[in-house]
Image (cartoon, rainbow, N blue to C red):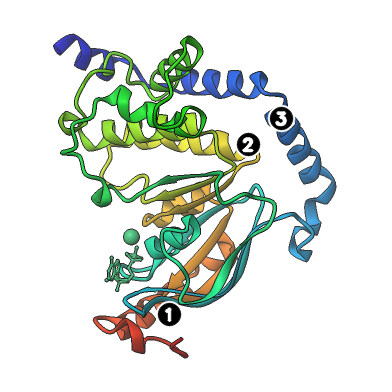
């Protein structure tokens, strides 16, 4: 056990490993390579046309209202997410951020309006739930949980072949957890658990990645490593939506921001959205909402 712990703390889990993993992944798949090149070409040729909306649409929220027991938690949302964009979803507690991601996965059906999928397929989503939504008492080992990333490939009764086992090992190594394979997930720290969940996401290899507070309650080193994973996904042309709380992280790494306060406050380039004025307005809108989601905002559904 102590050797394993030493292995983790010693390993600077590690940009080199992560980059090598992502590089091999990309080189191994012709389709991925094509997407990376077309994304780069697209950025080169389309560049400034982005503001004109000529990039491919990944998702459209069309008059979207989501809620629980018919009480809206996100109301009349109207905006679009472009393919290959890296977007932070921000807003005060209770603003509807997690609800929005659940609406995209399909776990929650709209009370009104819809989520439209443009270039993407709803079955091709990798979703990281908020840590508080994960039951860590479930008797699973690290390797069991990571292997679930291959669910789409192997199904519930499939066997893991040599190649798949190797991919699982590579994903575990990429997040710096080699040696932890048989550890029960209940015995992991918050940061280690988040690394395990990222290894599962790496295996899912999805076009659309949804992350709910991926960097909350983890140590600085884990955060730096996992940000690197997200940046690599972005370079590969995947579309990423991440719920975040820390404004500095949003400004440093996320080109786009969608600010929610039950309703849309603003959505666009981060520097134009993360203004003091918008943040103040979002807080005010959510204070007015407290305890009574159905009377929030301009127009209840
Ligand atoms: N399972 C649920 N049942 C009933 N209400 C819920 C449920 N989950 C969230 N809510 C309510 O929906 C609103 C938005 O919640 P949530 O999307 O979790 O906010 P955020 O992620 O922005 O903090 C809050 O008022 C919350 O209490
Ligand atoms: Mg939340």
Tell me which corner region of the image, top left, top right, bottom left or bottom right, holds residue 256: bottom right
Looking at the image, which residue is at 36% across and 82% down? Answer: 284
Residue 2, given in percent of the width and then of the height, sits at: 14, 12
Task: Give the foreground label among 3 and 1.
Answer: 3
Q: Is residue 79 shown left or right of residue 211?
A: right
Tell me which corner region of the image, top left, top right, bottom left or bottom right, holds residue 87: bottom right
Task: Give the foreground label among 2 and 1.
Answer: 2
Q: For this rendering, which residue is in front, 202 or 5? A: 202
Task: State which tag comes first along the sequence, 2 or 1.
Answer: 2
Task: State which tag comes first along the sequence, 3 or 1.
Answer: 3
According to the picture, the residue beneath numbered tag 2 turns out to be: 235
Q: How many marks on residues?
A: 3
According to the picture, the residue beneath numbered tag 3 turns out to be: 31
Label 1 sits on a secondary structure element that is helix
In the depicted structure, whether residue 192 falls above or below residue 297:
above
Looking at the image, which residue is at 22% across and 13% down? Answer: 4
Judge the density around disc 3: few (<14), some (14-19), many (≥20) Cα neighbours within 10 Å.
Answer: few
């Amino acid at each position: 056990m102590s050797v394993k712990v030493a292995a983790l703390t010693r390993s600077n889990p590690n940009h080199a490993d992560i980059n090598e993993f992502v590089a091999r992944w990309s080189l191994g798949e012709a389709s991925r390579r094509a997407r990376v090149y077309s994304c780069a070409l697209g950025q080169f040729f389309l560049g400034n046309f982005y503001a004109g909306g000529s990039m491919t649409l990944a998702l459209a929220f069309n008059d979207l209202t989501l809620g629980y027991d018919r009480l809206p938690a996100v109301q009349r949302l109207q905006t679009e997410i472009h393919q290959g964009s890296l977007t932070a979803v921000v807003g005060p507690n209770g603003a509807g951020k997690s609800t929005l991601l659940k609406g995209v996965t399909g776990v929650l059906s709209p009370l009104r309006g819809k989520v439209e999928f443009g270039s993407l397929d709803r079955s091709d989503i990798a979703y990281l739930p908020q840590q508080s939504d994960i039951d860590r008492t479930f008797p699973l080992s690290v390797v069991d949980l990571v292997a679930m990333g291959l669910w789409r490939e192997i199904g519930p009764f499939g066997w893991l072949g040599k190649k798949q086992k190797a991919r699982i090992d590579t994903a575990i190594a990429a997040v710096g957890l080699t040696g932890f394979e048989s550890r029960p997930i209940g015995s992991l720290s918050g940061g280690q658990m988040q690394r395990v969940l990222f290894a599962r996401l790496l295996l899912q290899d999805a076009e659309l990645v949804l992350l709910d507070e991926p960097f909350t309650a983890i140590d600085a080193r884990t955060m730096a490593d996992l940000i690197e994973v997200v940046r690599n996904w972005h370079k590969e042309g995947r579309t990423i939506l991440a719920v975040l709380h820390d404004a500095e992280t949003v400004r440093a790494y996320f080109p786009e921001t969608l600010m929610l306060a039950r309703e849309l406050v603003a959505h666009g380039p981060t520097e134009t959205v993360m203004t003091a004025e918008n943040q103040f307005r979002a807080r005010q809108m959510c204070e007015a909402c407290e305890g009574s989601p159905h009377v929030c905002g301009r127009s209840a559904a």
